[in-house]
Amino acid sequence: MDQVRKAVIPVAGLGTRFLPATKSVPKEMLPVVDRPAIDYVVREAAAAGLRDVLFIAGRGKTAIEDYFDRNAELEQVLRDKGDEERLSLIDDVTQLAQIHSIRQGAALGLGHAVGMAEDHVGNEPFAVLLGDDLIDRHDPVLQKMIEIRAKFGGSVIGLMEVPPETISLYGAAAIRTTDENDVVEITDLIEKPPADEAPSNLAIIGRYVLDPAIFSVLHDTTPGRGGEIQLTDALRTLVSAPKTSGGGVHGVVFRGNRYDTGDKQSYLRATVALAMQDPELGPDFSSWLSSMMSERRPGD
Ligand code: UTP
């Protein structure tokens, strides 16, 4: 089985950058316009043909599973009111994908979270989408990554050019170019390097298509930066592993709009950008926003 059919979405992180909101609400459930951030991520997986979604969840994340489940009581209330429009809105969410969920137990790192998916995924390539990484649906990248996996085998990671001084916030890639535009061969990966030691300004974003060989590598990956089992460290091993044992990593450079909804600044940008795009809310919201901006006095 070489087709990518399953998506793994880790949502077990603690979300400390968004406290106090995330004390009782998972960051993935914070709304961006009219739906929680995780809705966009599952929709993106479904749009790329991945209808089997596994959440790697942690404590207090049942709201995420409930969101994708049916709510018979609410459906009945809407049906009684004859509110077909809202009924179809909530029904649509339950139809997106077949949702599964397992618990990570303790947040031991992204590598550990992905390793938990082994039994569910089995011996086939699969996608990983970080639940707090929102990619504008007008700029799809996952489909292209799946095509690159089909072409070259091995694993494929999403990359984005970032200002060099911010690379220390990300995993950074050393690369060789290929004949194909925006497709690179990865020669090394370093998790959160100091800016002056980074091999490039190409940062790893939260989209991966992984060869199942990642699982055996993760078994042997010891805690790295921050005492966590890092997915980047396991991928680094795959960079130099032979192709015959699932090695080789390519990168697809993403040039669209992407937001880290676990970061307050980026979350606010996502909300404003998507509200402006919304066909119903956009026109009024945009004109309100521009009049508010023009009313701002210098120094406000
Ligand atoms: P982050 O680095 O954003 O960590 O994790 P976090 O804990 O979620 O957030 P902060 O930094 O405390 O604010 C990146 C992704 O990996 C998942 C997170 O849910 C997020 O999607 N993750 C991280 C896990 O699922 N398990 C872990 O042990 C660590």
Image (tube, rainbow, N blue to C red):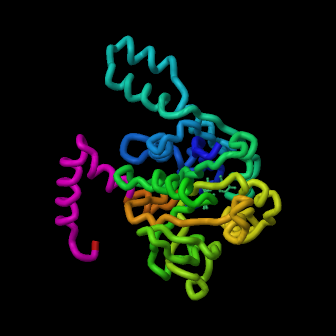
Viewer-proximal residue, 290 or 107?
107
Percent position of residue 26, x then y: 57, 46
Residue 36 at least partly seen: no
Q: Quadrant of residue 299?
A: bottom left
Q: Residue at x 65, y 66 (%)?
A: 248
Counting every numbered tag in the picture gives 0
**Image: 270 above or below 48:** below
Q: Is residue 217 magenta?
A: no
Q: Quadrant of residue 234?
A: bottom right
Q: Which residues are magenta?
A: 270-299
Percent position of residue 182, x then y: 43, 68
Residue 287 at least partly seen: yes
Percent position of residue 264, x then y: 47, 60
* Dominant secondary-structure state across the stretch colored magenta: helix
Q: Residue at x 38, y 50 (%)?
A: 137
Quadrant of the rendering where the C terminus is positioned: bottom left
Indicate left or right for 221 with 203 as reference.
Answer: right
Viewer-proximal residue, 82 or 240?
240
Q: Residue at x 62, y 48 (%)?
A: 126
Q: Quadrant of ligand 1?
A: bottom right
Quadrant of the rendering where the N terminus is positioned: top right
Viewer-proximal residue, 7 or 144?
144
**Image: 94 above or below 160:** above
Furthest toward the bottom, the residue is: 196
Q: Is residue 273 magenta?
A: yes
Percent position of residue 90, x then y: 43, 28
Q: Residue at x 37, y 53 (%)?
A: 271
Viewer-proximal residue, 11 or 135?
135
